[in-house]
């Protein structure tokens, strides 16, 4: 039993079959306080609610669980055409001691089955019957892998559902739609699905009838003329997305929670305008956004402070006080200036956003490509129109007391983040663990809502140099690729990963982590007690 965070345990089993049997037992007879399970190659990540069960009690209960027999149920079969021209095909061939043509031939000759899902919605971990396929991940993950890329990692094969970062060795590409909310189930590859690859000059996919049930039509976003209240994006700034408190509980679909990077700022903005605390709002990274309003509205701006003004269509400019409810009229434009501290500003609108949710949430998951309406999780662009419910839909009165601005760092400053070590700190030397805690780490510009990429003068030294089978990861996890430069996972992180996680930022510091701009220095400190984690 390993600690994965202050609210997660990682149960390690002997092999894939054992982890699947344990997961099946936990699904069949849930333990009190457990909120989510993430099965993986040799582990099951167990997330729990600390108000319902403590780690020690849950550990004893997990030790007493009797695994059930059998693997995933058969779930039909899929044939997927692949063009074997991946960037790493020649390297894979060299690693396996065969030619590139033989890699393709053996990949198509093998029979593959989906063991579990993770990383991102629609990403299935496939196990095959050809033992030659055991390939190490790349020493440093790519920041952009094209959608449909077919890869190898360890003994698994998989297909990236959309463009995303990743460290698998790429051998080809397909045009198969791995994830589609208008399909039931949305994932083409679910646990138990048998997969046969076919080598083609052009990519194609054929799904046998047993693999996918009947499709359904997703709710379309209402037409613009139907909405007397809306926000039009004139300028999105660095990144403009919609966020609420996320969609937890969908790990079985390979879907992580996502949600606001700074939950305190979201709650404060909603409280100011009289919305429910979990109502969706606009999250703007880097400032510089301009939004135009259709109909009257009440807004509040929290999070990273920026000079915010309302350009009146028929009157003088109005300065918006940080954290205060402010009225806007039809045709007004809200201008958000540049940021001097922090990274993300939250704009809440009284009454909330009138969009159809995706899996119960309006959050835009930028890694998964999952979000409300027809946005598909993408950031908002100039000309996008976001319908609003209108001020009368708010359940509470506006708060007359402006929410105070949280102190946030600027580039060049140093912040402290508290962490819990584990689950894989033993994969690093004692010197490597000391380096994590004693060295300043600088946030690089390659950071985003998926993860904060860090750079230190001394990389973390590994004690174990082999491959780690993919296992579950939590928001705040500190994952370390072979180059020794850590990545701190933020809300849109992959659900599973194959690089060792040396520790995890505690929940109370995650909002600060979501507000750190490039150039900020981080110093990690381990927590000394449970009381410190709780904030007692």
Image (cartoon, grey):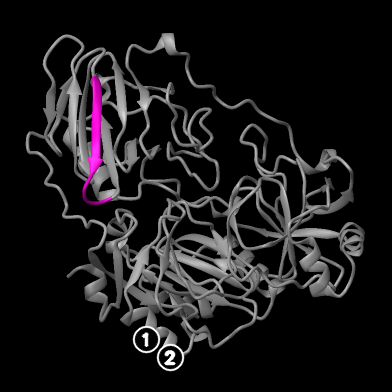
Q: Is residue 359 left or right of residue 180?
A: left
Question: Secondary structure under badge 1?
Answer: helix
Q: How far, Cα to Cα, is label 2 from label 1?
A: 6 Å
Q: Is residue 364 left or right of residue 215?
A: left
Instruction: Tell me: residue 284, above or below residue 393.
Output: below
- Image disc number at residue 336: none
Question: Secondary structure under badge 2?
Answer: helix
Asked whether residue 147 appears in the rendered view, the answer is yes
Expressed as whole percent of the image width and height from the top left, the position of residue 53 reads: 36, 69
Q: Which residue is nearer to you in this view: 354 or 82?
A: 82
Instruction: Tell me: residue 293, above or below residue 429.
Output: above
**Mark 2 burial class by Cα count in 10 Å: few <14, some 14-19, many 20+:** some
Residue at left offset 44%, top offset 39%: 361
Label tally: 2
User: What residue is disc 1 on?
Assistant: 434
Q: Is residue 28 left or right of residue 493?
A: right
Residue at left offset 22%, top offset 58%: 409
Q: Which span is picked out in magenta? A: 333-342
User: Is the stretch drawn in magenta largely helix, strand or loop?
Assistant: strand
User: What residue is disc 2 on?
Assistant: 430
Expressed as whole percent of the image width and height from the top left, the position of residue 412 reads: 25, 62
Instruction: Tell me: residue 25, above or below residue 289.
Output: below
**Which quadrant holds residue 398?**
top left
Mark 2 and mark 1 in contact? Answer it, CB < 8 Å: yes
**Mark 1 burial class by Cα count in 10 Å: few <14, some 14-19, many 20+:** few
- In the displayed orientation, state which residue is furthest to the left: 401
- In the displayed orientation, state which residue is furthest to the bottom: 430
């Amino acid at each position: 039993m390993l600690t994965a965070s202050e609210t997660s345990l990682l149960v390690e089993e002997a092999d894939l079959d054992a982890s699947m049997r344990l997961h099946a037992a936990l699904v069949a007879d849930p333990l009190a306080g457990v909120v989510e399970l993430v099965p993986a190659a040799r582990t099951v990540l167990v997330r729990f609610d600390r108000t319902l069960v403590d780690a020690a009690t849950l550990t004893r209960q997990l030790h007493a669980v009797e695994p059930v027999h059998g693997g995933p149920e058969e779930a039909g079969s899929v044939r997927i055409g692949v063009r074997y021209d991946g960037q790493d095909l020649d390297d894979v061939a060299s690693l396996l001691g065969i030619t590139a043509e033989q890699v393709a031939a053996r990949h198509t000759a093998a029979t593959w089955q989906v063991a579990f899902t993770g990383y991102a919605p629609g990403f299935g971990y496939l196990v095959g019957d050809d033992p030659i396929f055991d390939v190490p991940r790349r020493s440093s993950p790519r920041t952009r892998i094209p959608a449909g890329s077919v890869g190898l990692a360890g003994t698994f094969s998989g297909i990236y559902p959309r463009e995303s970062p990743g460290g698998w060795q790429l051998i080809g590409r397909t045009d198969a739609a791995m994830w589609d909310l208008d399909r039931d189930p949305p994932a083409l590859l679910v646990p138990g699905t048998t997969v046969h690859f076919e080598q083609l000059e052009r990519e194609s996919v054929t799904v046998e009838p047993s693999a996918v049930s009947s499709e359904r039509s997703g709710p379309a976003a209402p037409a613009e003329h139907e909405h007397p209240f809306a926000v039009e994006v004139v300028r999105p700034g660095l990144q403009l997305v919609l966020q609420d408190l996320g969609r937890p509980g969908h790990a079985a679909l390979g879907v992580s929670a996502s949600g606001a990077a700074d939950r305190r700022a979201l709650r404060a903005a909603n409280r100011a305008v009289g919305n429910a605390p979990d109502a969706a709002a606009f999250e703007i990274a880097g400032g510089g956004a301009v939004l135009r309003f259709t109909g009257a509205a009440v807004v509040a701006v929290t999070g990273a402070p920026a000079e915010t003004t309302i350009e009146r269509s028929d009157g003088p400019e109005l300065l918006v006080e940080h954290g205060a409810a402010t009225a806007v009229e039809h045709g007004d434009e809200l201008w958000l200036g540049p940021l001097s501290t922090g990274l993300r500003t939250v704009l809440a609108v009284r009454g909330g956003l009138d969009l159809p949710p995706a899996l119960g949430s309006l959050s835009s998951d930028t890694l998964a490509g999952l979000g409300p309406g027809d946005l598909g999780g993408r950031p908002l662009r100039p000309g996008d129109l976001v319908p609003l419910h209108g001020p009368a839909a708010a359940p509470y009165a506006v708060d007359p007391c402006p929410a105070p601005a949280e102190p946030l760092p600027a580039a060049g400053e140093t912040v402290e983040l508290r962490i819990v070590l584990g689950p894989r700190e033993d994969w690093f030397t004692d010197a490597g663990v000391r380096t994590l805690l004693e060295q300043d780490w600088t946030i690089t510009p390659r950071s985003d809502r998926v993860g904060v990429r860090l750079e230190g003068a001394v990389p973390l030294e590994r004690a174990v140099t082999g491959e780690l089978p993919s296992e579950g990861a939590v928001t705040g996890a500190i994952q370390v690729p072979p180059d020794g430069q850590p990545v701190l996972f933020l809300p849109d992180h992959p659900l599973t990963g194959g690089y060792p996680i040396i520790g995890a930022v505690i929940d109370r510091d995650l909002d600060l982590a979501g507000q750190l701009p490039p150039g900020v220095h981080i110093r990690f400190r381990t927590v000394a007690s449970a009381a410190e984690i709780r904030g007692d």
